[in-house]
Amino acid sequence: MIEKYEHHGVLVNVQSHLKGKHRENCLCFQNCKFFIPDDIEKNCEIAKANFKNCVDFNVVLPVYECPKYSPQKE
């Protein structure tokens, strides 16, 4: 089922079963050492470009494949 809801002040469409699940599916959020969203200077260039696209077009993009992904050491 497709539902509409307000996301950051814009009415968007989403598959109900996927709403709010981008972080658990996004490779960036899986402990990537290059993903530093709180530091614009150090954050991954790919992540910054994807985020800009999300802001510009009011979309959400989980990353499923990435050549830069590297987990942080535990």
Image (spheres, grey):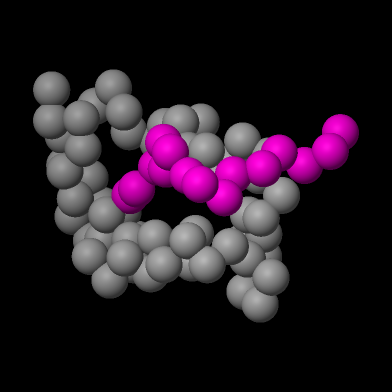
Can residue 4 be seen?
Answer: yes
Magenta-drawn stretch, dominant element (helix, strand or loop): loop
Q: Residue at x 63, y 54 (%)?
A: 35
Examine the image and state in which quarter residue 72 appears. top right
18 up-or-down from 26: above or below:
above
Where residue 44 sits in the image (x, y, percent)? 58, 62
Where residue 39 sits in the image (x, y, percent)? 68, 70
Q: Which residues are magenta?
A: 60-74
Residue 51 in magenta? no
Using residue 61 as the reference point, say whether residue 3 is left or right of it. left
Q: Residue at x 41, y 36 (%)?
A: 64
Where residue 49 sits in the image (x, y, percent)? 41, 67
Where residue 11 sits in the image (x, y, percent)? 18, 55
Front residue (pair 32, 24): 32
Q: Residue at x 59, y 44 (%)?
A: 69
69 up-or-down from 41: above or below:
above
Residue at the far right: name it. Answer: 74
Residue 65 in magenta? yes
Quadrant in the picture for the N terminus: top left
Front residue (pair 45, 7): 45
Using residue 4 as the reference point, say whether residue 71 is left or right of it. right
